[in-house]
Image (tube, rainbow, N blue to C red):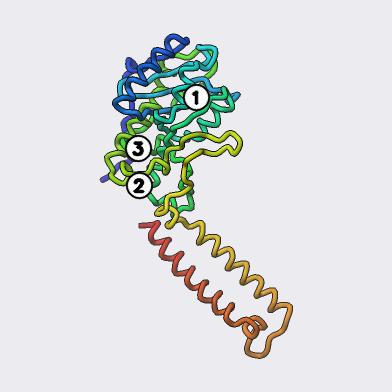
């Protein structure tokens, strides 16, 4: 008998969490990140925002530690951290990184470059989202990715209870650091899958963020196999077919036919037959897709 027992939580050693509350600490921690990049240039990444959409925390995780930069405590955004974030040689990995780029730019005029979206890697592996009409670029929750790739859950107890204002505790810093650390752990697990380890960077890493267009730079919009499975085009075609059938009906209601045929059947029989064939084809398609989703 199977049960839906909750998964064990993903946790990190609180001693691996280091917090920068001033510029000298920030400079020292970024220097360690740069040193770590010589072995692995990929880092877990996340930010925490206040209710005013200001960046309060920046979290960057390497294999050795999880660094939390408390921008409020530091008083301003350190130049050394700005330089690290805009350097696309260091790939900052997370979920919703495009949103993080927008927040950093709006809050502190900080450019985020070399940012990798885990959701895109996941959708390259699991194409089923396309069958539900989800776009390739749509985000997958970090908690969902942790469950799928690590068989671990995330403790979100502090998420609704605290808005990242005022004095923060060790628990708050550890909570924030965990999101960056789990992102890195998910990435390394994903790299054990050949199709993901061989993925072109442009499928999931953007080289910059355009403040004018508010879009990522250097990122392709879709993944061909995912797009091929997408139901969006089918839905659009069904909509056009319904529109064509309504026009035929309006025409038949306006102009008379004869005893055997409607006006459209007499005037444009090819179009009427096409509509009938497409209607049958869509019925077959929808039945088969319904069975596929249920299986």
Residue 29, position in %: x, y? 39, 15
Q: Residue at x 33, y 17 (%)?
A: 16
The CA distance from mark 3 to mark 1 is: 22 Å
Q: Picture quarter containing residue 272?
A: bottom right
The CA distance from mark 1 to mark 2 is: 28 Å
Q: Residue at x 54, y 76 (%)?
A: 274
Q: Which residue is mark 3?
A: 147
Secondary structure, mark 1, is strand
Secondary structure, mark 2, is helix
Secondary structure, mark 3, is helix
With respect to residue 56, does 284 lie above or below? below
With respect to residue 12, does 212 lie above or below? below
Along the polypeptide, which appears first: circle 3 or circle 2?
Answer: 2
The CA distance from mark 3 to mark 2 is: 15 Å
Q: Residue at x 48, y 57 (%)?
A: 231
Q: Which mark is residue 48?
A: 1
Along the polypeptide, which appears first: circle 3 or circle 1?
Answer: 1
Q: Which mark is residue 152?
A: none
Q: Which residue is mark 2?
A: 125
With respect to residue 202, does 103 lie above or below? above
Instruction: Say how many tags the image has.
Output: 3
Along the polypeptide, which appears first: circle 1 or circle 2?
Answer: 1
Judge the density around disc 3: few (<14), some (14-19), many (≥20) Cα neighbours within 10 Å: some
Decide if residue 156 is on the left or right side of residue 250. left
């Amino acid at each position: 008998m199977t049960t839906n027992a909750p998964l064990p939580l993903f946790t990190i050693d609180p001693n691996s969490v280091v917090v920068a509350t001033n510029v000298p600490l920030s400079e020292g921690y970024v220097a360690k990140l740069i040193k770590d990049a010589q072995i692995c240039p990929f880092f877990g990444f996340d930010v925490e925002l206040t209710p005013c959409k200001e960046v309060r925390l920046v979290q960057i995780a390497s294999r050795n530690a999880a660094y939390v930069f408390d921008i409020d405590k530091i008083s301003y955004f350190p130049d050394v951290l700005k330089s690290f974030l805009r350097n696309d040689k260091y790939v900052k990995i997370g979920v919703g990184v495009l949103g993080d780029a927008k927040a950093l730019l709006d809050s502190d005029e900080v450019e985020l470059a070399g940012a990798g979206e885990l959701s895109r890697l996941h959708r390259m592996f699991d194409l089923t989202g396309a069958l539900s009409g989800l776009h390739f670029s749509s985000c997958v929750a970090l908690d969902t990715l942790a469950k799928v790739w690590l068989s671990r859950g995330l403790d979100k107890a502090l998420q609704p209870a605290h808005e990242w204002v005022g004095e923060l505790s060790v628990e708050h810093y550890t909570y924030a650091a965990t999101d960056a650390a789990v992102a890195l752990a998910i990435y390394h697990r994903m790299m054990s899958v050949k199709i993901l380890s061989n993925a072109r960077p442009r499928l999931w890493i953007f080289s910059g963020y355009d403040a004018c267009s508010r879009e990522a730079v250097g990122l392709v919009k879709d993944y061909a196999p995912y797009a091929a499975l997408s139901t969006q085009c089918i839905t659009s075609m069904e909509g056009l077919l319904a529109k064509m059938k309504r026009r035929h009906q309006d025409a038949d209601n306006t102009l008379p036919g004869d005893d055997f045929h409607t006006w459209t059947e007499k005037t444009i029989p090819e179009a009427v037959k096409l509509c009938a064939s497409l209607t049958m084809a869509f019925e077959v398609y929808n039945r088969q897709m319904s069975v596929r989703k249920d299986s």
